[in-house]
Image (cartoon, rainbow, N blue to C red):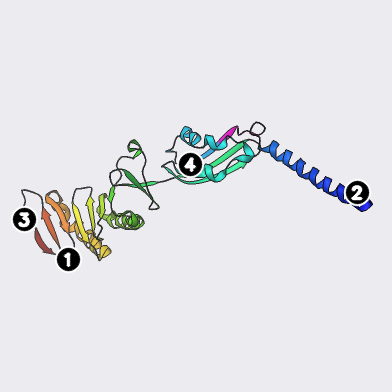
Amino acid sequence: MKQYVKHFLNISFIIAIGWGLLVVIQYLQNPNHFPIKKIEIHLLNGKTKSEDITNAITAELAGGFFKVNIEAVKNNLLSLPWLAEVMVKRDWPDTIILEIKEHTALAQWGQAGILDTEGVVFYPAAAEIPLNLPLFFGPASRSKEMVKEYLKILQALHTTHLSVKELLLSNQGAWEIKLDNEIKLILGKTAFNERLGRFTKIYRKHLQVLQPAVAYIDLRYTNGLALGWKAGHSRPIISEVIE
């Protein structure tokens, strides 16, 4: 009999503990008891408005402090075009902290996108595309490669005081550059660095004075280049590279 009573008490104790835990959990999960009162936003760059960030996650915060779905908050924020990285943290008793990093625009991608410094393409509203970005055209699968080659181009052009207006990579892998002086460089599929180096080597010494008349420079030659003249000037010619 004593053993039966002891067993009954043990079961009753376990039930009481379980019931107590259930009551506590229900209390904690009641959004009226621990509502989110503050959203703390740490934003790097600042292209995205605070109200857009808040609106994107308001529904996910309705359940209160303990029922916030951190992953859902993160995914909602990453759906905003400028946001690249998001970290979400709870801060007792009523605060959500957002650590946000935005994309850093490197170039305009096609007519409607932006390519960031990590090679990620994203599509903000047309009015949000910064002015004076170089314009890139190429396969989306090679966007990271285009960033890498663009940085090499900038370094190579440093001594010429020229900059890139457009960069094109065709589906067949051929490169073209349109410079800010409107001259197009045709580099082709191979020997990219060698051909670009050939251009920069002779530009200031031999080509700079010709630039008002030059439409394009074709560098797809082993030891030379071709100049394509603008309308009204001489026909294109092949010139040997001058050391």
The mark that comes first in sequence, 4 or 1, is 4
The mark that comes first in sequence, 3 or 2, is 2
Q: Nearer the viewer, mark 3 or mark 2?
A: 2
Q: Is residue 151 visible?
A: no
Name the residue: 26% across, 63% down.
192
The mark that comes first in sequence, 1 or 3, is 1
Q: What is the magenta segment's predominant secondary structure?
A: loop
- At which x and y percent is residue 93? 66, 37
- At which x and y percent is residue 133? 31, 44
The one of 58 and 234 positioned closer to us in this rendering: 58
Amino acid type of the residue that numbered disc 2 sits on in the rendered structure: Val
In the image, the segment drawn in magenta is 33-39
Q: CA distance from mark 4 to mark 2?
A: 57 Å
Amino acid type of the residue that numbered disc 3 sits on in the rendered structure: Arg
Q: Which mark is residue 221?
A: 1
The image quadrant where one finds the C terminus is: bottom left
Helix, strand or loop status at disc 2: helix
Name the residue: 73% across, 38% down.
23
Q: How many marks?
A: 4
Name the residue: 23% across, 54% down.
177
Farthest residue, direction right: 2
Q: CA distance from mark 4 to mark 3?
A: 56 Å
Residue occupied by mark 4: 77
Residue occupied by mark 3: 235
Helix, strand or loop status at disc 3: loop
Q: Check contact, mark 1 vs mark 3: CB within 8 A.
A: no
